[in-house]
Amino acid sequence: MFRSRARTAKNRRHNVIYSAPPDDLFDYLQSPTRPVGRPHKHDPENWTVADDWPEHVPVSEAEVDVYEAWFGDLVDRIFGPCQ
């Protein structure tokens, strides 16, 4: 009895039928759709600017050092050298 079960299980493994893979494996991905026509024109008259910065913004010494290292020459050209 044990041998007959083993043989049937072995035979089942060889009877597997493989089908062809699908043509497009990425069919689930939908391409983004673009709106038809001209883009909406933004009217600057309807824009609002909100200034929610505090009166005094805290700046550390490290931030000043980085700014001077990268933009020091540009600031000197615009505003003149430090006095």
Image: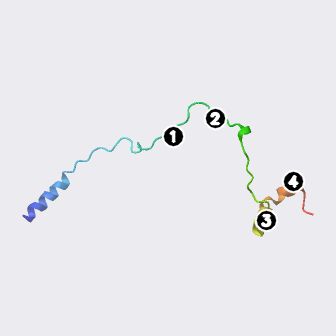
Tell me where residue 30 appears, x and y as whole percent. 46, 41
Q: Amino acid at mark 2?
A: His
- Dot 2 falls on a residue whose secondary structure is loop
Tell me where residue 55 appears, x and y as whole percent. 79, 60
Along the polypeptide, which appears first: circle 1 or circle 3?
A: 1
Spatial CA span between label 1 and label 4: 46 Å
Spatial CA span between label 2 and label 4: 38 Å
Task: Give residue 3's mark.
Answer: none
Spatial CA span between label 2 and label 1: 18 Å
Q: Amino acid at mark 3?
A: Val
Spatial CA span between label 2 and label 3: 42 Å
Q: Is residue 3 above or below residue 39?
A: below
Along the polypeptide, which appears first: circle 2 or circle 4?
A: 2
> In the rendered image, which residue does mark 1 sit on?
32
> In the rendered image, which residue does mark 3 sit on?
64
* Count of numbered circles in the view: 4
Q: Front-most of 46 and 63?
A: 46
Q: Amino acid at mark 1?
A: Pro
Along the polypeptide, which appears first: circle 4 or circle 3?
A: 3
Mark whose residue sits in front, 2 or 1: 2
Along the polypeptide, which appears first: circle 1 or circle 4?
A: 1
Q: Residue at x 39, y 45 (%)?
A: 25
- Dot 4 falls on a residue whose secondary structure is helix
Q: Front-most of 83 and 39?
A: 39
Tell me where residue 13 appears, x and y as whole percent. 19, 55
Q: Is residue 7 above or below residue 36?
A: below
> In the rendered image, which residue does mark 2 sit on?
40
Quadrant showing the N terminus: bottom left
Task: Give residue 78's mark.
Answer: 4
Q: Residue at x 9, y 63 (%)?
A: 3
